[in-house]
Image: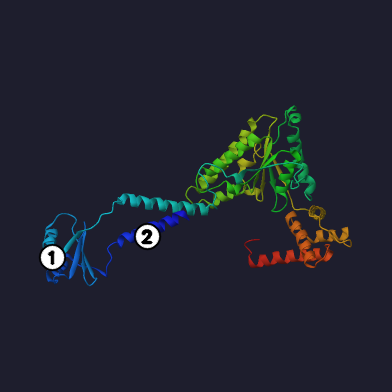
Amino acid sequence: MLPLFGMFFFLALLVMRSRKHRGGKLTEVSISLLLDTLEGAPTGDIQQAVIGASQCVLYFSSGARLFARLPTAVSPVREELWSALRRAKVRIVAEHVSGVPQIFVSGLFLVVYLGMVWTMMRRMTGGRGKGWGDARKKVMQAQQASGSNALVTRFDDIAGIDRSKLEVQEVVEMLRSPGRYAALGASVPRGVLLAGPPGSGKTLLARATAAEAGVPFLNAAATEFVELFVGRGAARVRQLFERARKMAPCIVFIDEIDALRARSNNLMGMAGGNQEAESTLNQLLTCMDGLATREPGRPVVVIAATNRPEVLDEALLRPGRFDRVVQVPLPNAAGRLEILKVHLRLRSVPVAPEVTAEQLSEIAERCDGFPGAALEAIVNEAAIRAARRNSSTVSMVDFEAAVSEFNQSREKTRQDFPWKL
């Protein structure tokens, strides 16, 4: 907003400068008509004449003003004008020249214009530009996994993806006891890619891996790396991995890593956009290759999540970078039932005594194709409906209504906004 205020301020200064000679209506005439007016005007009718470098303005006692443009060089026209003014006994005033050089005023306007452009570019990039070289602290939020923290996610808090949990549990063992694997010539995988539909639990699985291993968890989103300005995204990637090396052993989690390639395609029409995305991706690959030089006792593991593994660059998926690709599918009926039970336990939801395990299983059957995030939303909606009825427990009616409401809302959204689902 500051550049806008500055722009208005300098515009006001220009208006004030242009109106420094106040008077009535200003009429432009030719120099010959101006000379004729001087010859024929009665004495005292013209109050004064203001002569500048390129014009002459006559101020009449009636408030009217006439001005004519003058040649900038010395010419007979100026001599004739001076003679006519002396004959008409008109007071002659030289135009005041501002002490501020015109180049300085133009420079100020250039600065204000560049400030407005900078403000607009920051808004286009989501306000992410706080500096040219530093990565935002928000990009590198480090959370120390600790058993005393009630918000830490454990493997027991994740259900419905048992096979995926088994595949990442070995990474936990490597982080806990890297020396045991190093003695056999084995090394911790540099990268683990979690691929699965939205809401299937990829982020929870990454957090649980860090919590179970007892190492710091650095969270970042790929969308926060790519900017319109070349070099800024690469700088953020470098600072993220520099911090990871200092905190090793640790886990770096990059969510929506496919956004690097998707964002690259979206910015191809903008100058420097595709180059910036490629630069950021190449920097990520370089940093992951540099993890191989770390000492065996202080590993850094990169875990990435994606909804669209098919759009990822092949250089990312080759062994030595993301050594393991773990599929995180949608849960089956048994998995959905376990997820419902986990969220009921974590939220301490008081379920009515008449709700049996078979009835909860029926709810899980009705939620075919639902990811874990949707099942959590259903548990929450059922609890809200119970509170709306002023009930102290959540009954089967609340669960059924929550599932029906969820299905109806999604179906209505598909009809009204088919491009969003």
Q: In the image, is residue 396 above or below residue 305?
A: below
Secondary structure type for disc 2: helix
User: In the drawing, does residue 125 fall left or right of residue 413?
Assistant: left
Secondary structure type for disc 1: loop
Rendering coords of residue 404 (x, y %): 76, 66
Coloring applied to the structure: rainbow
Mark 1 residue crowding within 10 angstroms, few (<14) / some (14–19) / many (20+): some
Rendering coords of residue 394 (x, y %): 82, 62
> Looking at the image, which residue is at 34% across and 61% down?
15
> Looking at the image, which residue is at 52% across and 54% down?
123
| Residue on which disc 1 sits | 89
Q: Badges 1 and 2: C-beta atoms under 8 Å apart? A: no
Which quadrant: the C terminus? bottom right
Q: Is residue 103 visible to the viewer in this orientation of the structure?
A: yes
Rendering coords of residue 111 (x, y %): 40, 50
Q: In the image, is residue 104 above or below residue 289?
A: below
Rendering coords of residue 216 (x, y %): 69, 39
User: In the drawing, does residue 118 fall left or right of residue 70?
Assistant: right
Tell me the CA gap for discs 1 and 2.
Answer: 36 Å
The mark found on residue 7 in the picture is none
Q: Is residue 369 visible to the viewer in this orientation of the structure?
A: no
Residue lying farthest top?
183
Q: What amino acid is labelled 2 in the image?
A: Ala
| Residue on which disc 2 sits | 12
Q: For residue 384, what is the image quadrant?
A: bottom right
Mark 2 residue crowding within 10 angstroms, few (<14) / some (14–19) / many (20+): few
Q: For residue 372, what is the image quadrant?
A: bottom right
Q: What amino acid is labelled 1 in the image?
A: Lys
